[in-house]
Image (tube, helix red, strand yellow):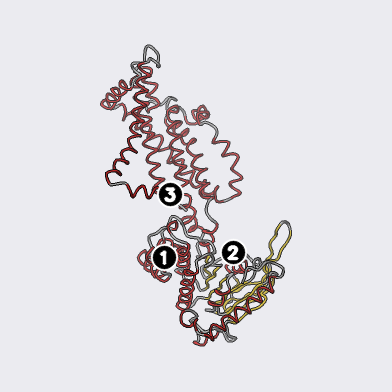
Amino acid sequence: MTEGRRNGGFWAGAETFITLKGVSKNFKKNGKEITVVNDCNLDIAENEFLVIVGPTGSGKSTLLKLIAGFEAPTTGEIRVGGDIIKGPGADRGMIFQEYALLPWRNVLKNVELGLEFKGSKNEAENRKLAMKYIDMVGLSYAVNKYPVELSGGMKRRASLAMILVTKPKILLMDGPFNALDSKTKMTLHTEITRIWEHEHNTIIFVTSELDEAVKLSDRIAVMNRAGRIAKIFNNDLPRPRTGKAALDTDFHNRFIKLREEVLNEVKAGAGQAVCEYR
Amino acid sequence: MADQIEKKQQSGVGKIGAFLMGRSYYVLGVLLFLVVWQAASMLKLFGNDFSEAFSPWAAALALVEMAQNGDIVRHAIPSLRRVLVSLAFAILVALPVGVLVGYFKRLEQLTYVVFQFMRMISPLAWMPIAIIMFGVGDLSVTFLLWLVAIWPLILNTAHGAGRVSPLWLNMAKTMGAMDAGILRKIIIPAAIPDMLTGLRLAVGVSWIILVPAEMLGVPDGLGYFILDTRDRFRYDQLMATIVVIGAIGYLLDSINRWLISKYSWKI
């Protein structure tokens, strides 16, 4: 980790941590074989924040599931730290689009779940660790609440803490902030960035919002309707990217410019299909 | 919304009054039932000769008598023992079977027809077979009760285990959970509300089947005592025994309802 890394996006000298080589995924639909992910090649560095965007049906969620190990690639291979992945694992924590909180456990008990799975029996220690991450996502005022009592934003925070507490090296996030109001979303952007800088995770983040993509990423991979990675943009915008920094004219112009370039690429990749990106 | 406003407008006294008012209808219902029962007895609806003995008042006196001479305890204890023992064995078999059947789609399909078929057969139909297998006595009764209790337990547990969200399973896997952990921390807790519903149904149907089952040659129990009071022409005691059967059944169901309200989760 060099300091230049923070302000430089992905750079050539970085060591590869996750490698996708010729990864394709076919599904059978109505008896026809369709290719959802098509010959994707991708090298992701340790502690990189990679955002994947693309029109509906471009296979970005499937790509994430392949990396998580929930699906096996039809062809090609995915390596993490040099080893080919075989199924899901605790090194790759996935945060789902829907909430996966257990309704019979309160927030604290939900966050402790991952530690119980790891087999750590020390209850006091588990509680302390769970509280640390609940604090980190700003939910300490609601530790005793049950999922049914939580708002959408609170559920996102709880889901995040649930995965973070297991200390995954890689965070896979599938539209984690979709359908949240813009204020909550902005807070969570700040917090996920802070957590990422603090915990040094590698994050692969799928979204359908370009502002989010430009705000968070080191690089932005654009997928097209053919299920291919059409283009990868380096995002050199200096961090932090919120608050005062965002008001700087030069920063603002660069932000808009990058966003425009990515948008054009997404639109080109959408072809005849309706494009939800604006 | 309207409810909340109404609640706010009520004073403290009004609240207590409303609470009593709500309860009073339960009490009133019981009283009305006693009146109808007494009227039926006075109108000789139970026949000219015995209607007197069938009255609630006669039953109440017999109940006091049976409480004092120990008849209630003497027969209620074996009945409860039979139901609880058979339930324990039913739970032992039904919970694992239910979880497996609920979790594995193939196993569910494999067992579906047989289970639905078996559950529609009154266990009393098995009575001759039970007597051949286990002889006349406790074991046969317990077996019949076990046979009636397992179906609601299996089918409800299976329903609960089948309801486990794939999302929870995926989340557990992404946390590196093993199969045993997933079973213990996700599938079983997820199925608990349905297991308790199954238990409530099993207790209800066991208690109902108990009475005829105890008429099959056991020397004690509430079912046996019904026949005994009849043979002694003590129809007041017969009525009192019916009241005891109903009361214990109500109590058992209340315990189950309490368990359900305590251990159920909401989405």
Q: CA gap, disc 2 to disc 1?
A: 25 Å
Q: Name the residue under label 3.
A: B264
Mark 2 or 1: the one toward you: 2
Q: Is residue A242 above or below residue B163?
A: below
Question: Residue B42: image x %, image y %?
Answer: 35, 16
Name the disc covering residue A120, or none: 1
Residue type at the position of mark 2:
Phe
Residue type at the position of mark 3:
Ser
Mark 1 element type:
loop
Mark 2 chain: A
| In the displayed structure image, the side of residue B61 where residue A157 appears, left or right | right
Q: Looking at the image, is mark 2 or mark 1 earlier in the sequence?
A: 2
- Do marks 2 and 3 share a chain? no
| In the displayed structure image, the side of residue B186 where residue A56 appears, left or right | right
Q: Mark 2 points at which residue?
A: A70
Mark 2 element type:
loop
Question: Residue B173: image x %, image y %?
Answer: 53, 63
Q: Which is nearer the eye, A16 or A182?
A: A182
Mark 2 or 3: the one toward you: 3
Mark 3 element type:
loop
Residue located at (45% from left, 78% from top): A198
Instruction: Check disc 3: other Cα within 10 Å, few if <14, some if 14-19, many if 20+.
Output: some
